[in-house]
Image (spheres, grey):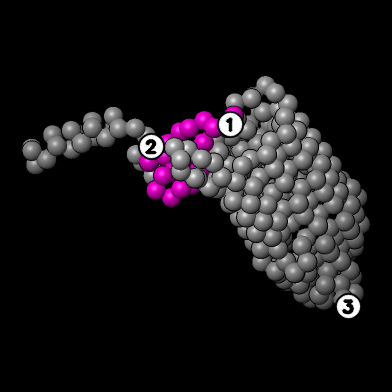
Amino acid sequence: MKRVLPLLVLVCLITSCLPSYIYKKQRLSVHIDGFSYYLVPETNYAEVVGHHRYEDTIAVNLPETIIHNNKKYTVVKVEGFSFAGHNLTSITIPNSVTSIGYGAFSLCSGLISVTIPNSVTSIGEEAFYACTGLTSVTIPNSVTSIGDSAFIYCTSLHTITIPKDMNVLKAFKHCPMLTNIQFTEGIDSLVVIDQYAFAQGVLPICIIPDNVTSIGLGAFSQCKNLHTVTIPTSVKNIEKYAFYGCKSLNTIHYEGTVEQWNQIAKDKNWSMNTPAFQVKCTDGQVMR
């Protein structure tokens, strides 16, 4: 045991002096044509990690492939915070990219246009945090994961298209201009509208897709223009403050019977601080 401990200490000292990329699949850091990348030689993949023209107001077109030391690398990821705070006006992401990282374009207040290709499968948390110039986003059907608050504080965002293979949605809180949510036809995997998903938006009408089972904490809270909601029979749970402060709410269309509506597990404060409204069911109505 006395011999083992010194050996362990020696190993720790040696490994602590090794370059960090040893533990990241031997990632190499390079700068090509104004962009910074991590390269992974064993996979021929490249990850965008930054841009040199930080102060310039520019439109960015990311390349699909790059060449380094006569070797071609495919750009597969926009790393976290790669363009955070940059003066971008537009960003075009190539068809090779599968992932947009945490906060990748956060605080890009001048960003008005973003093209997300069908290759992207995940958008990280706060990826477009406070992109206050962004007005509309079409998220392709390839995307199956959108991180928490991915579009939080996008204060000019008025139109979004939700892909059909999403299962949990919680990305658009504090978007005060959001008036149009378009769920892709055939959407059947969305089961949870999660906490504060659309909080403080201005959408007037919302038709919740079939298969959604839960409307989360504060999901539509303080949507003060929301006057009509359609809820499918798949919904089994409405959580606290789901429709808190929806001052204009007057009608919920429920696609089942009064008995089915009464069987939904509803927090006692699910519609707190809203005026009286009616729930129209297939065989009658309930006043709330």
Mark 3: few/some/many CA within 10 Å (<14, 14-19, 20+): few
Q: Is residue 130 above or below residue 98?
A: above
- The mark found on residue 21 in the picture is 2
* Residue 35 is one of the magenta-drawn residues: yes
Identify the secondary structure beneath mark 2.
helix
Please indicate whether residue 132 sits to the left or right of residue 29 in the image: right
Q: Earlier in the sequence, mark 3 or mark 1?
A: 1
The residue segment tinted magenta is 26-47
Q: Is residue 92 above or below residue 240?
A: above
Compute the Cα span from label 3 to label 1.
65 Å
Q: Report the residue at 81% width, 75% height from top.
A: 256
- The mark found on residue 283 in the picture is 3
Identify the secondary structure beneath mark 3.
loop
Amino acid identity at mark 1: Asp
Q: Report the residue at 43% width, 50% height from top.
A: 43
Mark 3 or mark 1: which is in front? Answer: 1
- The mark found on residue 33 in the picture is 1
Mark 2: few/some/many CA within 10 Å (<14, 14-19, 20+): few
Amino acid identity at mark 3: Asp
Q: Earlier in the sequence, mark 1 or mark 2?
A: 2
- State the image quarter where residue 11 is shown: top left
